[in-house]
Image (spheres, rainbow, N blue to C red):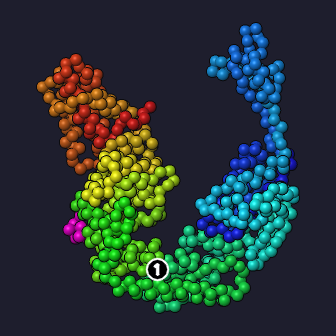
Amino acid sequence: MTKRDLLLEIGLEEIPARFVTNSMNQLAEKVQSWLAEKKIAYDEVKAYSSPRRLAVLVEGVNEAQEDIHEEAKGPAKKIAMDDKGEWSKAAIGFCRGQGAQVDEIFFKEINGVEYAHVKKFIKGQETVTLLHELKQIITAMTFPKNMRWADKELRFIRPIKWIIALFGNEIIPFSITSVETSNWTIGHRFLGGKVTINEPKEYEKALLNQYVIVNPEDRKNAILSQIKAIEEENNWIIPIDEELLEEVNNLVEYPTALFGRFEEEFLDIPEEVLITSMKEHQRYFPVKTKAEKLLPFFVTVRNGGHEHLDKVARGNEKVLRARLSDAAFFYKEDQKTAIEDSLAKLKSIVYHEEIGTLSEKVERVRKLTNNITAELHLSEEESEIAERAAEICKFDLVSNMVYEFPELQGFMGEKYALQKGEKEGVAKAINEHYMPRNADDETASSNPGAALAIAEKMDTIVSFFAIGLIPSGSQDPYALRRQATGIVQTLLNKHFSISLEGVVNTSLNLLEEANILKKAKKEITQEVMSFFKQRLKHILQEKHIRYDLIEAVLDNEISSLPALVKRAEVLEAKKNGEGFKESIEALSRVVNISSKAENVAEINVDLFENEFEKNLYNQFILVSKKLDEEISAEETFALLVSLKPEIEQYFDHTMVMAEDRNIRNNRLSQMVNLAKIIKKFANMNEIIVK
């Protein structure tokens, strides 16, 4: 079958950089899905984008759909034919619907029943007759933000200016918002012009001649190689922030990297401020020495050629100078304000109308931090550092610098706290309590910082759950999932063996005192713990723990997270070992029968009727005592497994559900006590053994 290339390009006004890549991928995916749905074979799909265009080139598209040979299933034979062997109305209707005659029917047996079938042949349509449907692919695209323009009804990311729709050298006719499809495109806004694309395979080269590198990976590589050249020429280190690189790449069509400088006096401003100002406001890359010291230079990427780079550099320097002058002013002004004055301002800032002010939140966080440090048995010095850090952890939110650069919260808190005479540990904890800030960030390294990070995040999570603002689906406006994951990661990385339920309950008690709870504490606790279990499930899955083993360790009170993870890892390591199946079956049998107990009483050894009851009881006492000691998860599992012989002997010779009520209750009580120490490790009933 002959083939042609297919090209679809949507020319637009400048798309916001953060939406370009996802929009390009969406268009490519929609085109691929459409080709698959229409059964049109092709060789390869290539996606292209720039700030002013989204495009897809499909190479080697068949000129017709695949012919379809299939069997259509109809009614059962007893319905298709009557007692006289005549075709029924159902059979005739089935054939009519399939474009067949009743004499074409044959029967095939499926699960012991014969059904009528006919063979169908559907001739594939010519591809060119279907390509007008590309219009629906474009208009069906979705974006985080849409706009309408002029008197048009279509909502799209930006106004459509031109559309290329080519199948070989043939234009596919359709229009969107009065824009007719064509075979021409427009190059760089200032350096290029209108250009005709005669064949789809000419697309990349034709646009390059018009100063547009339409392949985003080629554009990114060009930026990187140019930055590398500047780096080597000047003996600098230019750190590459991947998010910044992606954004810059989607801001330009023909990149040219250059560097500028700023006054050395600005280096007196904290490095984080300078870098943030360069990255967030100007999209500049900072420059450092090989010793990681910031230099008074920056690298920017121009959307154009190499002409007049000196003028471009001077213009960028002028803009940055104004930004840094503002930052220097804010920095000096902030140093005039005492911490206590900043804290007083928090009383008038509403954190959330149903939760209270920032000042009230800080007080709850302080109390919760103290509770956590006490449970962790931190030293007196670390506890004092944690409490002071909790008291002032939000004071930098009212600073000029954080107002201008919100992403510097915590960083500026640490800087200002040190300047105002706070202990180094206090300043560090102020910064660390926001950690981890994102999926790639580290957790707090100091004990006070980690305790405060847990307390602050927990107060946020429980507060929003308490007023009914719970994440659902993709909706999580307060980033509660990220904060819950941060708590889990902090507890695991610091090996903090504190009860997660205990921290949640303490937080709820503080919110109850403030009259913030909108529903019963028990209900909120269940919702919050279920929420945390979902986060734990993801973390255990990343550790390649089998799903049923995850369910087993989570089907209980979570308590210490490091211990829970260790239990899951032990089960994962043992699951294929000799005797694992038999051990789990024995332990599960105890757990199963313990559920039949109605009244649990103290075990009465005088009611034992055979030596096997005594043997199991004695082994239970021995294991229980050893479990009270500080032992590893592996040792704990070994102790539980050591009960297997006695459990098997017990069930071989003992009827738990005895007719005598006292004996039955005594035996059930023994099962309940045994099940408690088993379930404390994991609910063995959740484990699948074969």
**Image quarter (top left, top right, bottom left or bottom right) of the C terminus:** top left
Q: Is residue 618 left or right of residue 525?
A: left
The prevailing secondary structure element of the residues shown in magenta is helix
- Viewer-proximal residue, 80 or 235? 80
Where does residue 553 sit, x and y in percent of width and height? 36, 43
Task: Give above or below for 473 relative to 428.
Answer: above
Q: How many marks?
A: 1
Quadrant in the rendering for residue 599: top left
Frontmost residue, 45 versus 512: 512
Answer few, some or many: residues within 10 Å of disc 1's Cα (few below 14, many 20 plus, some between 14 and 19).
many
Residue at image position (82%, 26%) is 100
Please, what secondary structure does the residue beneath circle 1 have? Answer: helix
Residue underneath mark 1: 273
Residue 642 picture location, percent across and down: 28, 36
**Percent x, y for residue 71?**
75, 28
For residue 160, say whether it is visible: yes
In the figure, residue 674 lies in which quadrant? top left
Tell me which corner region of the image, top left, top right, bottom left or bottom right, holds residue 427: bottom left
Q: Quadrant of the N terminus?
A: top right
Q: In the image, what residue occupies the spot 19% across and 42% down?
A: 625
Residues shaded magenta: 378-385
Q: Residue furthest front?
A: 151
Residue reaching furthest to the top: 84
Q: Residue at x 65, y 86 (%)?
A: 312
Task: Name the residue at 34% across, 60% down.
Answer: 459
Q: Is residue 255 magenta?
A: no
Using the image, determine if residue 161 lies above or below residue 174.
Answer: below
| Residue 224 pos. (x, y %) | 63, 73
Is 613 or 209 nearer to us in this picture?
209
Residue type, mark 1 in image? Val
